[in-house]
Image (cartoon, helix red, strand yellow):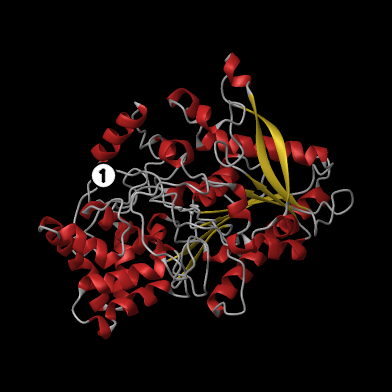
Amino acid sequence: MAIWLLLLLSYTIFPQYSSAISITNKITPGFPSSTFIQPEQQATKTNTTTSKLYKEKFFTQILDHFNYNPQSYQKFQQRYLINDKYWGGASNNNSPIFVYTGNEGDIEWFAQNTGFMFEAAPYFKALLVFIEHRFYGKSMPYGGSKEIAYSNSSTLGYLSSTQALADYATLILDLKKNLSATDSPVVVFGGSYGGMLAAWFRLKYPHVAVGALASSAPILNFDNITSSFSFNNIITQDFRSESENCYKVIKRSWQEIENTAAKPGGLEILRKSFRICKNYISAGSLSNWLGTAYTYTAMTDYPTPTNFLNPLPAYPVKQMCKAIDDPTTGNNTFEKLYGAANIYYNYTGEAKCFDLIDDSDPHGLGGWTWQACTEMILLTDGNTEDSLFPASNYSYNDRLEFCKSNFNIEPRPSWIPTEFGAQHIHRVLKRFGSNIIFFNGLRDPWSGGGVLKDISKSVIAIVAKEGAHHVDLRFSTSEDPEWLQDVRKREVNIISKWLSQYYHTLIDSPNS
């Protein structure tokens, strides 16, 4: 879910990849409602602003890298963004190329939220490239038609992480050739799903990228490697660490919502309490709306004000709990929750009512539902008795039924660990992996599926106790805490070592 001296989230992030709560037992594999999601720079997004960050270009990409059927040779235009302001060039300096491996959405949203790369570029004299993921943004196969590309399982079948990685490799090698930069080293960057792609790219295409910074990449969140309770347990701890009363109010609220909804006139009480628009309300939709706010606030519990998902203050979890603990609301649970929800959904104070069924998708995230029904079976739906959310177990059958109903396909929950490796990851990567940074902030619910310990001298885990979702990739600010400044300095130093080693090898073996 993207962003930074930046993820974008998007997601991505993440984005998140599947419904974080199972209050209504309804599987929603994509992002929860993106109605309120806005890019970091939306308030100032103009042609002048974006033109200073990058230029938009397109690459003619093949539809299917792994088969030789006639339809495999169809082409589509893949978008990428490029910034050469600080590039030292290729002819004499072999200056590096920094590539962002695009997430599940419009690449501009990610580029506008990936400050780390822009701020590191002058130091390294790096060329910046942000590649859009196939089936997102403007990178739509089938003549650029989203309607055709998303029309059925046969067309969507070409949307996968392996195809995306092959896209990136093909584009990077062609770009280097056209720039006469075949000896310029490439470092890949990504956050959330993009961070997963960055790590996998280094493992699958080590001849293309010399290293990868994978921020908040939950590569272990598959196939029961990580507990399905982990995600929501971390959200619970985030809120509980701020206020025990805050945690208790939220925890008991789910039943209060259900009880109120069941009374005559109860839904109108809920509508008025939470300022819900008059078109629709139900206990389940309201609970999901609140759960989404808690989940994304925990993910983006940044130490400075942001506008990545929504306009938010610094430390928004703390601000939510302050609203819940506000003594002026007395014992009115719904007023307390409304105050908390306002932190996430209406911090600017502009919203007059909230629409629980607005399914708009301003950043083109819709393709994730397909990915969450095929290979991205991330386990996030379990709740223990102590959870902030109602106790429940993860149910693969819910996902299976949803995917069969919507796409007539069955998910492949073991494919990602099979393709990229995840079981015994420390043992495996120690044998053959190198030059990967895994950053995780422990306030990020996705960190439970991240690599939290060093694997070798060059596969390094950077863990920040107070960090949130790919906070290291955000644009820096004068208010950044010292720990965050230190994280970024360490990442720069590690990347410098990778590049130094590469250049020494190039000098020692120029023709090998």
Q: Residue furthest left?
A: 263
Q: Is residue 443 visible?
A: no
Expressed as whole percent of the image width and height from the top left, the position of residue 88 reads 84, 56
The quadrant of the rendering that contains the C terminus is top right
Expressed as whole percent of the image width and height from the top left, the position of residue 196 reads 51, 48
Q: Is residue 205 visible?
A: yes
Q: Is residue 117 above or below residue 131?
A: below
Q: Residue furthest front?
A: 278
Please name whichever residue, 353 or 176, is drawn nearer the observer in this view of the structure: 353
Expressed as whole percent of the image width and height from the top left, the position of residue 114 reads 61, 59
Identify the residue under disc 1.
26
Q: Is residue 313 above or below residue 84?
A: below
Name the quadrant containing residue 74. top right
Left or right placement of residue 255 versus residue 494 in this view: left
Callout 1: helix, strand or loop? loop
Q: Residue at x 26, y 75 (%)?
A: 246
Q: Residue furthest top?
A: 70
Name the quadrant containing residue 460. bottom right
Q: Residue furthest bottom?
A: 327
Name the quadrant containing residue 93. bottom right
Left or right placement of residue 302 versus residue 377 in this view: right
Q: What amino acid type is highlighted by mark number 1?
A: Lys
User: How would you rate the neighbour count of disc 1 (Cα within 10 Å): few for under 14, some for 14-19, many for 20 or more?
Assistant: some
Total labels drawn:
1
Q: Residue at x 33, y 77 (%)?
A: 323
